Image (spheres, rainbow, N blue to C red):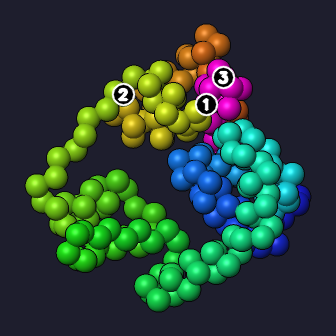
Amino acid sequence: MEDPLDSSYPPSIAFKAAQMQDNNKAILFLREIREMVFLKKINITKWEHFELAAKTVGLNIEKFKSDYENNEKALFEEDLKLARELGVRGFPTIFFLDESGNKEIVYGSKPYPFYETSILKLNPNIEKSEYSKNWETLFSKYSTLTAKEYSVLSGTPRKESEEFLNGLSDKGSLEKLTTKNGSIWIQKATKQSN
């Protein structure tokens, strides 16, 4: 409303530039620009915001800028072409493939069990990996989390998750950012060190 995006293409191209440098950092970059637009009302089509997000996640800024300006538009257009060829009708569309080329597709944003079911159809013998669900471990992997995200990852009911995160915020272990659409909790040390 205040500084609307005129296109989703620049952030998509910036993501490609980040992805070509480091896929894990690209995922963090995507989270950063999502938080900018959805929580802070920042127009993420502008270079200065891409640069800030890239610095925050530890990308090489010179390479990132060069790739963004010179190489990634063509790669992004290849992605769009592939999406058309695969029949992508909306976002997100998640494809799961096995070694034999069998495919499962999940259209739209769905609860976790839909994705798990697709994976199990392709590989019924696969077993879930366990992970630590304590808050320190979760926030070391994901430096920002909403109460719903924390609830899903920790296996804690939603209401209890928000109360717990508020308690950590009150103690100074996390920073809480509240918007009209809800709150997000930020691990202070991780956010500052990136």
Residue 125, percent across and down?
Answer: 11, 55
- What crowding class fits label 3: few (fewer than 14 Cα within 10 Å), some (14-19), or many (20 or more)? some
Residue 35, percent across and down?
Answer: 68, 47
Determine the CA span between mark 1 and mark 2.
Answer: 16 Å
- What crowding class fits label 2: few (fewer than 14 Cα within 10 Å), some (14-19), or many (20 or more)? some
Tell me if residue 62 is in the magenta stretch. no
Q: Which mark is residue 185?
A: 1
Left or right placement of residue 22 versus residue 115 in this view: right
The stretch of residues the image draws in magenta is 179-194
Q: Which residue is found at the position 59% from the left and 35% from the top? A: 144
Which amino acid type is shown beneath numbered disc 3? Lys
Residue 170, percent across and down?
Answer: 63, 14
Using the rendered view, name the quadrant where residue 185 is placed. Answer: top right
- SS class, disc 2: loop
> Where's the N terminus, which quadrant?
bottom right
Which amino acid type is shown beneath numbered disc 1? Trp
